[in-house]
Image (cartoon, coloured by chain):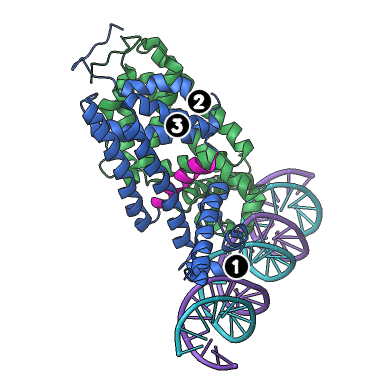
Chain colours: A blue, B green, C purple, D cyan
Amino acid sequence: MAALTAADRGREVRHRLLRAGAELIAERGWSAVSTRALAERAEVGPGLVHYHFASLKALLAEAALGAVKGLVDELTGLLETAPTVQEALDGALGALDAYTGRDTTSLLFTETYLAASRDEALRRDLEVVLARIRDSVAGRLRRDGVVADPEETAAVLLAALDGLMLHRPVHPGLTSAGTAPVLRRLLSRTDSTGDAEGGS
Amino acid sequence: MAALTAADRGREVRHRLLRAGAELIAERGWSAVSTRALAERAEVGPGLVHYHFASLKALLAEAALGAVKGLVDELTGLLETAPTVQEALDGALGALDAYTGRDTTSLLFTETYLAASRDEALRRDLEVVLARIRDSVAGRLRRDGVVADPEETAAVLLAALDGLMLHRPVHPGLTSAGTAPVLRRLLSRTDSTGDAEGGS
DNA sequence: GCCCGTCTTGGGCAACTGCTCAATCCATCT
DNA sequence: AGATGGATTGAGCAGTTGCCCAAGACGGGC
């Protein structure tokens, strides 16, 4: 009565290929991932790649999008359990400290953005995933009533986090200790509608 | 006594190859640039690539770093002529509107960051270029006395700008109109040393 | 026993990869 | 006129690429 072992093992192999794809994109860069390397990493024959996937491009897109979706869902959950946005931001920044900017996750993210700018289908898929987490952050900001422009703040905040990931490898001292106070200013209430600057 | 035309034309070809390299990195991605494509774009024979450069990697690194240096110098100049940091920020954001996130410049930037995370020599070179503009921004912030932590603010600001470039292709409505007010909050004086949040 | 559907293998193809190299070009100098 | 020396060409090498496909493996249903 157990499920068909053949189909099951097939699904398992497919999954292994996707995981290998995500790893190799981060390690070598999107366009440097080959079917042979993929198969070797997944410990399967080279021909299997094109049995489970229509093309190499399709495999990479599915692998990257899956990984991004996974982290986005994780962060979304973290965002809803945190008592305040500020604490959620601190949590995210702590996680960003763990990511050195040279780890699988952050590199894969950047590679996916880049690939999306060159592949219309991937761009559309990535767009909805990012819109989801942005709406989630914006909703949280609106509920807490911290800022006047939740949508824009959420967009800039997420972009800033990705930007910090991107800069990390070429900026050794870039840790959450220094960046957190600055970023928290994004979430500060803009009391002064006009200007509050001192003289020159 | 005029310069040797041969050597001069050689330099010109070398320059053309570098320009073709920068273009192709942006168009196809770092690891998808081939010597043949390079030569064709520069309108020279395929063998010339390895006459003027030690390797394909060396050509790409020099091309990318040169382009980054160029834009950094340009922005540095713009930063010093602007009356205030706020106006300089607005200027940078205006330029960012021109860059759609799918143009040669912004894609090349991201590709270079990514390549730097995989090539130690490139990483070091890019590090000093970025440190230069960061110091420039930080110095300006310190002179204007806008924020308490100029270094960290400069780092986050630059990361945020690159992040916005990165997000642009997958976030259609991301223009300076929406982001400028948010980013300007980064440059707001932190009056309250502690917290200033109202109750929930 | 047999068949069947699914997964898996590995060899093969045409195209492309980075890089090398002998040969050629051509303005300049002697 | 001949020599010089850098720039340029295009063929060629060995290795890799994405993708295809005939052949086999291996389970469950008859």
Where D25 sits versus B134, above or below? below
Q: Does A50 sit left or right of A157 as displayed?
A: right
Which quarter of the rendered picture does the C terminus of chain A lie within?
top left
**Residue D17 screen position, x and y as percent:** 58, 63
Residue that badge 1 annotates: A46
Q: Say whether marks 2 and 3 touch (CB < 8 Å).
A: yes
Q: Does A40 sit left or right of B183 as displayed?
A: right
Q: Residues within 10 Å of mark 1 (few under 14, many from 20)?
A: some
Amino acid type of the residue that numbered disc 3 sits on in the rendered structure: Leu
Element under label 1? Answer: helix
**One can see residue A180 in this view:** yes
Q: Which residues are magenta?
A: A103-117
Q: Residues within 10 Å of mark 2 (few under 14, many from 20)?
A: some
Alpha carbon separation for disc pair 2 and 3: 8 Å
Most frequent secondary structure within the magenta stretch: helix
Residue that badge 2 annotates: A174
Out of D26 and A85, give the one closest to the viewer: D26
Mark 2 or 3, nearer chain start = 3
Residue that badge 3 annotates: A164
Q: Residue at x 41, y 31 (%)?
A: A92
